[in-house]
């Protein structure tokens, strides 16, 4: 049975605990160097740096020229907040405009203005990279929509909203790794190229050398067998549960779905975990819920300004919804109960909810609303609609498997998981039903050499970010979105 350690030391660092250090001979950063270069976030928060001569590097977010003094706002991506630079008239600032890259030396002092903690009295300003603000698609005093910004994947990191998203992604990744490490999971690098179709959907990107495709050579494969970009690392993690009790993976996955909807990407990131020696879906569900809440709490603590920007400008009311999700226990419904709720609902559905059919997004959102906009686990799905590896509940006449989906507000399905079928006779029967016995002979062998009951789940990282930030389009929470008919950069 899984037990949370209750301790996450890697997550308990102060919000901006920056190491102001330089690289020494041993490869470690040991102290300040060369004009005490500081990140903007460090300059704003490090009270010990006040009164010191420092150097900052970044990009100009605003230029305000007065009679004698010019004020520059500088940002380097370390913080949503800018550092104000005070430039006296004797400094050469010709050519410095909105968007320019600059390097500035000066004295860091307490700012006389309430809205900023510090400012830099510049002694020297160097223009590193010029920028023509007329041609830049983002204007200094305009608020651009996510849809507009999405047109410029090579430039959108320069906007406040997308730089905030990238910092939040980074902190979320850190929190996820720290959660698993603190709870005894071993990080496994599962392959991106695989011969397995874990989901069985057939929506795969096949891999072959470009030369073979150009010459249209047939009947041979680079790896001797058909190979694909992975849709999941689950089966490889299951291999590892033969020697490790808790493992996880965090990496890119691929689906060749010909869809351009706001819900779909061809490349996205998955967090996947497997637990050995578990015979209960409750163990899997506890990991899902704890991971969600601890990661989200970490983001709210470490990126408050960035999250607030989304909650204020993109999804008003999302802050209150997040608080509800964090303070309440997630609900649990059986698939049968879920179908009953949907059939009794007064809502009109495009797809009729019937026992034996998979839940559609409209059904998932209805169930979440029914539960008061609290995340809800739906468990024990029909045998015929889940993959071959899901554990048979042997509960005829309904016949279900020990599978679980976590549904969350605004997104629908966030996590999917199951107990895995460890009983060799039942697994063989299932593989034969699907015509997969030869393909997954190795998977059968796992059950012959010290196999144990086990289970796991996968969490869509981009969908998680959509959930906590209130972003409707999944293309707005990944640095470089790939989807059908679009692979820019």
Image (spheres, helix red, strand yellow):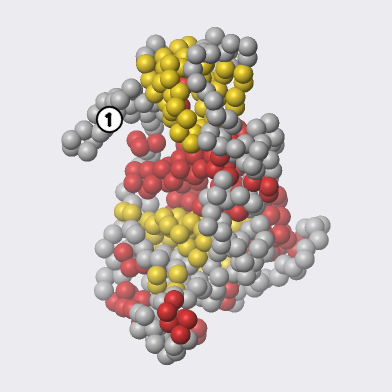
For the residue labelled by badge 1, is the local secondary structure a helix, a strand or a loop? loop
Going 57% across and 51% down the picture, which residue do you hit?
A: 153
Seen in the picture, residue 370 relative to 61 is either above or below; the reply is below
Which image quadrant: the N terminus? Answer: bottom left
Q: Quadrant of residue 245?
A: bottom left
> Farthest residue toward the top?
112
Answer with left or right where residue 415 lies relative to residue 358. Answer: left
Seen in the picture, residue 116 relative to 266 is either above or below; the reply is above
Q: Position of residue 134 (x, y in %)?
A: 65, 38
Q: Position of residue 182 (x, y in %)?
A: 34, 43
- Taking depth in this image into account, of 177 and 444 the one nearest to the observer is 177
Residue 358, can we see it?
Answer: yes
Answer with left or right where residue 390 lies relative to residue 333. Answer: left
Label 1 crowding class (10 Å Cα cut-off): few <14, some 14-19, many 20+? Answer: some
Q: Position of residue 336 (x, y in %)?
A: 64, 65
The total number of labels drawn is 1
Q: Which residue is mark 1?
A: 22
> Farthest residue toward the bottom?
219
Going 43% across and 57% down the picture, which residue do you hit?
A: 251
Going 44% across and 88% down the picture, which residue do you hit?
A: 217
Q: Quadrant of residue 348?
A: bottom right
Going 18% across and 35% down the picture, which residue do you hit?
A: 25
Q: Quadrant of residue 238?
A: bottom left
Residue 304, can we see it?
Answer: no
- Taking depth in this image into account, of 34 and 304 the one nearest to the observer is 34
> Farthest residue toward the left?
25
Answer with left or right where residue 462 lies relative to residue 229. Answer: right
Q: Position of residue 145 (x, y in %)?
A: 69, 43
Seen in the picture, residue 20 relative to 262 is either above or below; the reply is above
């Amino acid at each position: 049975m899984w037990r949370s350690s209750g301790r996450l030391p890697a997550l308990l660092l102060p919000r901006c605990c920056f190491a102001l250090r330089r690289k020494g001979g041993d490869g470690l950063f040991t102290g300040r160097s060369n004009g005490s270069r500081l990140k903007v976030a460090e300059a704003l928060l490090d009270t010990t740096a006040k009164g010191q001569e420092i150097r900052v590097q970044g990009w100009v977010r605003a230029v305000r020229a007065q009679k004698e003094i010019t004020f520059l706002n500088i940002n380097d991506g370390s913080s949503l907040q800018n550092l104000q630079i005070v430039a006296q008239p004797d400094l050469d600032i010709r050519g410095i405009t909105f968007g320019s890259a600059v390097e500035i030396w000066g004295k860091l002092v307490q700012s006389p203005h309430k809205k900023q903690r510090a400012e830099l009295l510049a002694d020297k300003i160097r223009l590193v990279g010029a920028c023509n603000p007329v041609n830049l698609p983002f204007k200094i005093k305009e608020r651009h929509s996510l849809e507009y910004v999405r047109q410029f994947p090579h430039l959108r990191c320069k906007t406040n909203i997308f730089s905030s998203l990238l910092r939040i992604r980074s902190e979320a990744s850190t929190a996820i790794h720290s959660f698993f490490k603190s709870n005894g999971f071993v990080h496994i690098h599962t392959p991106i190229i695989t011969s397995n179709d874990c989901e069985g959907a057939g929506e795969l990107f096949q891999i072959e050398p470009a030369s073979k495709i150009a010459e249209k050579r047939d009947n041979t494969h680079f790896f001797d067998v058909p190979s694909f970009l992975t849709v999941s690392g689950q089966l490889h993690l299951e291999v590892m549960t033969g020697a490790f009790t808790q493992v996880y993976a965090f990496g890119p996955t691929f689906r060749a779905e010909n869809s351009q909807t706001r819900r779909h990407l061809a490349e996205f990131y998955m967090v996947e975990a497997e637990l050995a020696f578990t015979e209960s879906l409750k163990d899997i569900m506890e990991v899902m819920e704890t991971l969600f809440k601890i990661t989200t709490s970490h983001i709210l603590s470490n990126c408050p300004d960035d999250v607030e920007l989304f909650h204020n400008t993109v999804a008003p009311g999302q802050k209150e919804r997040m608080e509800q999700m964090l303070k309440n226990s997630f609900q649990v419904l059986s698939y049968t109960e879920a179908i009953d709720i949907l059939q009794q609902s007064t809502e009109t559905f495009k797809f009729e909810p019937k026992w034996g059919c998979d839940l559609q997004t409209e059904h998932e959102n209805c169930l979440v609303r029914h539960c008061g906009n609290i995340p809800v686990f739906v468990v024990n799905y029909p045998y015929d609609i889940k993959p071959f590896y899901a554990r048979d509940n042997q509960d005829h006449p309904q016949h279900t498997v020990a599978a679980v989906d976590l549904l969350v507000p605004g997104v629908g399905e966030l996590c999917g998981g199951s107990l895995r079928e460890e009983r060799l006779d039942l697994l063989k029967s299932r593989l034969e039903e699907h015509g997969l016995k030869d393909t997954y002979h190795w998977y059968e062998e796992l059950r012959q050499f010290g196999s144990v009951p086990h289970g796991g789940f996968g969490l869509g990282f981009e969908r998680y970010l959509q959930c906590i930030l209130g972003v409707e389009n999944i293309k707005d929470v990944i640095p470089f979105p790939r989807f059908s008919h679009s692979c820019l950069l």
